[in-house]
Every structure is written in structure tokens, then in C-alpha cells.
Amino acid sequence: MRNGVYVQDNEMKVQERIYQGTRSTKTDEKGSFTFKARVEDYAVLILEDEGFAQVTVKELNLKPEVRLQPWAKVQGKLMVGSRPGADESVRLWPAHLPYEHHPRSFPPLSLYLQTQTDSAGQFSFDRVPPIAMQVYHSPKVKDGKMGTTPMSQTTSFSLKPGEVKTVTIGGKGRPVAGQLVVNGYNGTIDWRADVYNLELILPPTDEFPDLLVLSREQSAKIQATDSEEEKKRLIEEMQKSREQGLAKQRAFYATDKGREYYFQNKRYALNFAQDGSFRVEDVPGGKYRLRVDLREGGGDGPMRFSAPRIANLEKEFEIPDSPGGRSDESFDLGKIEMEARKIVSAGKLAPDFEVKTVDDKTVRLSDFAGKYVLLDFWAVWCGPCVAEMPHLKATYDAFKDDLRFRMVGLSLDPNIKTVREYATKNELGWIMGFLGEWSKSDLPNKYGVEGIPSVFLIGPDGKIVAKDLRGENIKTTVERTLAKTGSAKAN
């Protein structure tokens, strides 16, 4: 993001003060131009009344002639249900295909065009670069002007030089409604301070592996072995697999099939009322993910994202297909409950829970009333969690026979078999609960866990004695706490 070309108005005039590292020049009477070479130079962009050009330095080395391409045009109609979306904001920006400008993470052109629809819902962008673009409805779903731009009915496509692309945004699918309820929070929530979305979940493709799943599986294998030679081999294998996976991704997205797959991504902005109820128009059938990150306070700037979190949610839904492709009958998601993030500190009551263990039993915190409980949120795929295991084992070995003390692990791994095998191989003798993937469990949120490992010591009265324990301090804290209450060894 150190350099690029920033355009924010329909006249395609470059805002040169945005990227201080970007240089510009004018051509001479013969059309020639020159820049002094720099190591990080990536591309030359030309935006003129006559047309557009974007050519990489690598391409210029092969052929130092740049030909302007005629501007494309994007026009169309916005529909909201069965009626035209009149006087609504429609925006356009580059679609930015994955790895399209590798090794750059961001495209060299930052383009943000905006227009208003007319009374018939019609809109037009008359000067558009002939590249991959995305057009979307920017509905009035938030009260402030700064911060995240609402994006709904996102529609992506590739443009050819001089092409006139006609699109219809919305008018398909059905309305989706629901209500978010935050349990355990007594403050006022400004539901219209931020933007929240439904995002279409694309079906997996066989063209490349899921790198996140692959990484976690391989990390679990690495953590499970005691052999340094085997660990080194597995690490090298993991790095090689990742490089191969990334190469497959880059190759796939460079094809027409990969481009069309990526263009299927859709986003729909939720329109909230201040009671937490929401509605979003024109959602086609499919599998969707709802993400909500609620923050305290009002305000209208980027500082909201560093404000204390109220609650967060990630939940998947299946929206049924609409008869004939469109329906006015809304699909009601009902009440969606969120747990307020707890500020769990010493002296506070620890939230009770009931979870399955890796050996298919049930464990509850209340089972250990009257005892001290060391509670560890962790995962096999988490390196820092595994690094704490020697300290946890030392604590367990020292106090496992003390009738006043118990240890419970709560795994956030996606696969119970991985946890069971790791616990057996590494002789973890304490109770091992299984929560599954973090995004599908609300227990970490109840404990205010934002990172793992997260280790708590809970007292006989169910209140937090200590939190965020690490290293040798785990055993020291347990030892010091038990010493205050005498001795109680098992026979």
C-alpha cells in the first residue's frame, strides 16, 4: 500500500496526494516518458481522455511502447424486490482477483466511482478501465458517513476495451429477515453504527487445497511427534505443501474457470433497526455466513474498531431457493442469540459449561464445586498452546493426587480424533473437553478469550482466582493457592 494510483471521481482524475511514493510525469510531443528506475517499481498507469493503459515494468522491458485502450462503460438497473431502486447509491471498483498482481498484495489502481440511480433505478459509469471490475449497491444501512462502505448485491465481471456492459443489480432471490439478541449486556447498542453482511459461501473446488485446513492438519502432526528428525521432515513437508498449494491457487485464478469461480462471491448488507432486527433484500438461495463484530459506543470513525467489543458472531445459514427465481415472501432467520463478551477478572464468577470430552463423556464446571479447577483453552494446531504443555504437565503431576484440585482442557481443534491422539501420545492425564472450531463455540466468548492458550484458575466457590497464566507461573500459582488451604491428598 506504499504506492499506487488513486482515483475517486467519475472524471478519472488521479488524486496524487494519496500515495506519496507514487511518481507521475507528462509525455513529450512524441508521446515519450521516462522514470528513473527503482527496485520496487511495478507498473505504469496512464489515464487520459483518449483512454487507459496499465502495463508492468516487466512488459515495458520487452516492448517499450504503450497503446491506450478505449474506456469501457458500465450501465444497468438497480432493483429492490420488484421495484426499481430509485435515488440509491451505486459504486464501482476493481474486482481484484487473487494473485492478479503477485507479488503485490493490492492492485496498482485504487478506483472508487460512485453515482446515484435515477427514478427508474438506472445508473451509468461512462469511463471505466477495461479490467476486472465490481459494481454494487451501497444502501443506507448506517447512519454515519465515515468508516466501512456498505456493499450489497456485489456483481463482478471482466471488461474489454470499448465494451458497454449492461447489468441488473438485485431483483432476484427473496428478502431475509431476523433479529440479533445479545445476552448478558445491559448497555445501549447502536446497531446502525457499523456495516454487517451476509456472504455467500462458495462450494469447495478440487483445483487447490484448503490451505487453512491443510496447515492445521500438518501442525497437529508436527506437535504430535517427539522425534526432532521427524519434526524437521514434517515442517519441510508443510512448507513445500503450502508453496505448492499457493502455486495451484495462482494458476487456477489466472484461468477463465478460476476467474468465474471468484466472480461468484456475493455480499449483502444487512439493514438494522435499533432493536437488533434486520432485513436484507434480494438474496438468492445458497449457503451464507453472517459475521457480526459489535463494538461499544457510537461515533463515526475508524476508532470504533478499537473500541471494546460487546460481542461477536460467525454463523452459517442455508437460504432456500425462490420459486421462479424471485419471491416477495421473506425468509425469517428468527432470533439469533449472541453472548456478550465477558470481562472475566479475579473475583468474578466463572461461567458454567457442559461439554463432551474426547472419550465421549460429559463434563460440567459445576461437577467440581468445592474444588480448585485449572482451565485451559487450547488447540493442537496452536504452537504457543503446545509450548505450554510441559508446564501444564508439571502442574498436573504435582497436584493430581490432591482432592482439592482438578484440571480441564478445552480444545478448539476442528477434529476430535486429533485431540484424542495428541492427548494419548503425550500422556495428558487430565480431563480433555472438546469444543470444536472456535467460530462454532460460544464458550470462549463467555470467558472473554480472544487468544489461546488462555489458562484460568477457578476457586471452590466458582470464582476466578487468576487468569492469563503462563509458563512456570501456572504451577507456582496453583501451589501458592493450595498452600493457603492446607492439605488434602488422595489415599
Image (tube, rainbow, N blue to C red):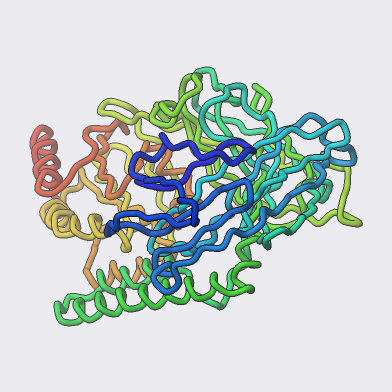
199 or 154, nearer to the observer: 154
Q: Is residue 443 visible?
A: yes
Residue 381 drawn above or below residue 294: below
Q: Is residue 418 left or right of residue 289?
A: left
Image quarter where the C terminus lies is: bottom left
**Residue at the far front in the pictured view:** 29
**Residue placed at 60% from the left, 63% from the top?**
262
451 or 211, nearer to the observer:
211
Q: Is residue 354 left or right of residue 7?
A: left
- The spot of residue 366 in percent (x, y) is 38, 41
Report whether residue 1 is seen: no
Q: Is residue 256 above or below residue 371?
A: below
Q: Position of residue 14 (x, y in %)?
A: 51, 40
Is residue 56 shown left or right of residue 224?
Answer: right
Depicted 54 relative to depicted 63: above or below: above
**Residue in front for this viewpoint, 102 or 369:** 102
- Number of numbered callouts drawn: 0
- Above or below for 352 versus 131: above
Q: Residue at x 58, y 73 (%)?
A: 205
Q: Residue 324 appears at what percent x and percent y?
A: 91, 57
Residue at x 83% of width, y 39% of height: 122
Residue drawn at x 54%, y 56% is 96
- Give residue 75's position: percent from left, percent from top: 78, 47
The quarter of the displayed image where residue 233 is located: bottom left
